[in-house]
Amino acid sequence: MELKTSGQKINSILANAHHVLLVGHQRPDADALGSLAAFSYWLDVLGIPHTRFCFGFLTNSLEWLVSVEPIFSEKNQLRQNKFDVVVVLDSGDLQYAGADDLIAEFSDRPIIINIDHHATNRNFGDVNLVDVTAASTTEIIFNLFKAREIKITPKVATALLAGLIFDTYNFTNPNTTFKTLQTAAELVAAGASLAQVSETVLRNKTLATLQVWGNALSQLTINKELGIATTIISHNDLANGKSAEVAEGAANFLNNLSGVKAAMILQEMPDGTIKGSLRTNDDDIDVSRLAQYFGGGGHRKAAGFKINGRVITDADGGWQIV
């Protein structure tokens, strides 16, 4: 949907809203949280009551993005509320957002606004502002704010920049365009703190993170016929209280590997599933199609999926999924 038209529809819906539920995807990253923070600011400006929800949100180095207002992370915390509008940010579908069953339980179906940049988005909203040419969802919100002439404060600019830098891996991913760099420049001009974003989004690797990455790199294999580099992160790698989230960014790191067409990381999750992360810099490869085959989604150059199973390793260092 064209930005001006969709912006008018979204504004009209919000003007008549009584209580809005803002939803970022499960275990949110900087793009989801930055989008959530910016949209929450807009609702504050409009004086519209709203609640923020990210299923499985954990306190981490990105908590500063969402200010002091709470983010609910459990569905039972919301079941006593009544929402007439739901805004879903940075999610290809309601299941990925962790809100499909929650919304199904509402006595009255709310109006759903879907804002996203993933090519595999299912256009599940009553209003769908989906721009697959945008490098991040925060870039879409920035353009929406410009179209609606909404003032962007330095704090909001920083939140939007965080999403942009995270999803482009500091402007190194193939989804970085002239528009992306222009948006970043305008956000810095609006007062965004590049130093704060760099410190918390990029220079945030702990010793535990690097130890997990080290184990993953030691098990890296390359299929020369297919040109795919693959490795695993198992429960053993995440022992001694290490969070499963420390593996974030490893797929982007492997995307720097020369001599391969794509990289894949398979990570055992605490819930008994395996999370697959796919990356490529090859113009002829669309990893989102492989992710969709396994029920996931994403972009041509960065995608992911989740399947049931566990990783079994043998004495020779080999592994298989069962």
Image (cartoon, grey):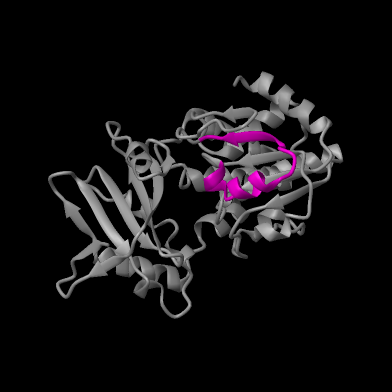
Seen at 49% across and 44% down, the residue is: 167
- Viewer-side residue, 308 vs 42: 308
Q: Is residue 208 above or below residue 265?
A: below
Seen at 81% across and 43% down, the residue is: 19
- Viewer-side residue, 125 vs 138: 125
* Rendered image quadrant of residue 38: top right
- Viewer-side residue, 84 vs 303: 84
Seen at 61% across and 35% down, the residue is: 115
Q: Is residue 259 above or below residue 152?
A: below
Q: Quadrant of the C terminus?
A: bottom left
- Viewer-side residue, 162 vs 284: 284
Residue 33 x, y percent position in the rendering: 62, 50
Q: Is residue 117 above or below residue 96?
A: above
Please indicate whether residue 126 sits to the left or right of residue 205 in the image.
Answer: right
* Rendered image quadrant of residue 161: top right
Q: Is residue 106 magenta?
A: yes
In the displayed orientation, state which residue is furthest to the bottom: 240
Q: Is residue 127 magenta?
A: no
Q: Is residue 158 visible?
A: no
Q: Quadrant of the N terminus?
A: top right
Total marks shown come to 0
Q: Is residue 42 visible?
A: yes
